[in-house]
Every structure is written in structure tokens, then in C-alpha cells.
Image: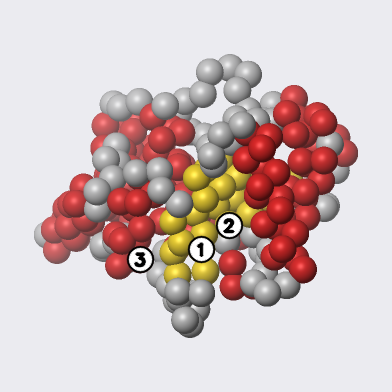
């Protein structure tokens, strides 16, 4: 009984967060978590409104899922037509990308897909692709031919993709970029290089790309 109440409370939080999450997402979230974290509840309204958003919160506060959940929902309920390229880019300066993908992308996508099947609703699982310096040439060619809905990559790999004509083409459809671990690149050449790549990404896309930044707590936040 207590578990059912927790499920309803978590689903209600998603409804109250200012973001119109679909029923499969609310159902999965209510079953997976007792409630939304404060960081998630505060981040969803501006993210849903398409605003640039900087989310600073301690480790373990669900920042990455906060950024991904809205993107997963929009991609799953509004699937792209055939031939359209990548719509979300996730950038991380750290190496543990495979763990991030499993925890914050593939696992939620599988759960939401199952929830949609049980509810009889419509949800098309977004495709996810990983591009790093270790990605083989063959896999890079496959990705260029069939771009993933969500691209997970590093700042350095994004720079190379923006430079090469074939991979640059798949970035013309990007609508959202999520930049994780901002505190790890602040005040460094790597951060300055990334800032330039983000400007180039907007130029390639030909539109303003929503930027969602994720960081551990920083002081003073105004800077």
C-alpha cells in the first residue's frame, strides 16, 4: 500500500513540475523512484519551456536524468521522420560514458517502453549512439549513414565531427545539447575549446540550440 502511494506521489510530482510528461514516463518514474529530487523538480519547467538551463547540484541528485527525461519523452512521443539526423547531443568530458548511457538513457528508455506497452500507449524508443576516440571507422561510417536520435560524445569528438563534412551533416538537426560536468572544464583551454564548438554547432544547425548545463555545486553560482 505504501509503495502504491509512493508511485502516485512521484507521478504527481512530474505533473506538478511544469512539464507535460507523457503517461508512460509518469508511470515508469513513479515505479522507479519514490519522488523527484529537488534538482529535478526545479529543472524540468525551464527545460520543458525550451530555455537554456544550468543545473548545479551535488552528486547523486539526479541531474543527468533530469536533463535526459524530457528529451526521451519528446523523442519517444514525437518520433523523427525517416532520414532526419540527431536531435540531442550529450557531451561529457569524463571517460565513464558507457555507465552514463546505461544508467540514464538505455535503462529509462527500456522501462518507459515497457510502461507504454502495458498502458497501450504510443512510444517509439529513441536510438542512442556513442562516439569517442575509441569508436572504429566502420562504426563512425554506420553512424553517419544512420544517425542516432541521441548522440553521446566528448568535447574532442564533437570538434572532429563538426570539422568532417559527412559527420557534420548529421548535426544539422540538433535541437538540444546537454553539457555534463561543466565544473571539470571551467577556466581551462579545454573549456574554451568546447565553448567554440558549441557556437559552431549552432552555426551548423542554423538555429538556436537549447543548452542544458550540468555541474556539481559551484560557488559563487553567479559567476
Pointers 3 and 2 in contact (C-beta within 8 Å): no
Closer to the camera, 28 or 89? Answer: 89
* Residue 2 image point, x, y percent: 14, 63
Q: Which disc, if any, is residue 39?
A: 3
Give the mark nearest the N terminus, 3 or 1.
Answer: 3
Q: CA distance from mark 2 to mark 1?
A: 6 Å
Residue visible at 35% across and 51% down?
Answer: 46
Element type where label 2 sits in the image: strand
Pointers 2 and 1 in contact (C-beta within 8 Å): yes
| As drawn, 104 above or below 128 | below
Q: Which disc, if any, is residue 179?
A: 2
* Residue 152 image point, x, y percent: 64, 48
| Residue that carries the numbered disc 1 in the rendered image | 214
Closer to the camera, 181 or 114? Answer: 181
When asked about the image quadrant of residue 121, the answer is top left
Give the mark nearest the N terminus, 2 or 1.
Answer: 2
- Looking at the image, the residue that sits furthest to the top is 82
Q: Residues within 10 Å of mark 1 (few under 14, many from 20)?
A: many
When asked about the image quadrant of residue 129, the answer is top right
Q: How many marks?
A: 3
Residue visible at 73% across and 29% down?
Answer: 169
Give the mark nearest the N terminus, 3 or 2.
Answer: 3
Evaluate whether residue 141 shows in this view: no
Q: CA distance from mark 3 to mark 1?
A: 11 Å
Amino acid at each position: 500500500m505504501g509503495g502504491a502511494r509512493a508511485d502516485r506521489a512521484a507521478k504527481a510530482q512530474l505533473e506538478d513540475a511544469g512539464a507535460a510528461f507523457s503517461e508512460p514516463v509518469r508511470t515508469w518514474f513513479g515505479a522507479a523512484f519514490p519522488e523527484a529530487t529537488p534538482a529535478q523538480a526545479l529543472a524540468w519547467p525551464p527545460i520543458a519551456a525550451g530555455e537554456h538551463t544550468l543545473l548545479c547540484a551535488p552528486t547523486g541528485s539526479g541531474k543527468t536524468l533530469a536533463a535526459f527525461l524530457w528529451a526521451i519523452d519528446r523523442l519517444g512521443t514525437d518520433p523523427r521522420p525517416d532520414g532526419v539526423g540527431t536531435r540531442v547531443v550529450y557531451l561529457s568530458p569524463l571517460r565513464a560514458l558507457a555507465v552514463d548511457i546505461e544508467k540514464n538513457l538505455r535503462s529509462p528508455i527500456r522501462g518507459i517502453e515497457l510502461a507504454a506497452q502495458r498502458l497501450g500507449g504510443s512510444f517509439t524508443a529513441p536510438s542512442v549512439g556513442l562516439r569517442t576516440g575509441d569508436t572504429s571507422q566502420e562504426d563512425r561510417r554506420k553512424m553517419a549513414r544512420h544517425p542516432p536520435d541521441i548522440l553521446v560524445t566528448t568535447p574532442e569528438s564533437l570538434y572532429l565531427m563538426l570539422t568532417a563534412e559527412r559527420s557534420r551533416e548529421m548535426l544539422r538537426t540538433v535541437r538540444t545539447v546537454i553539457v555534463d560536468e561543466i565544473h571539470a572544464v571551467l577556466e581551462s583551454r579545454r573549456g574554451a575549446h568546447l565553448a567554440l564548438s558549441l557556437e559552431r554547432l549552432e552555426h551548423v544547425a542554423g538555429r538556436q540550440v537549447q543548452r542544458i548545463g550540468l555541474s556539481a555545486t559551484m560557488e559563487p553560482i553567479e559567476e
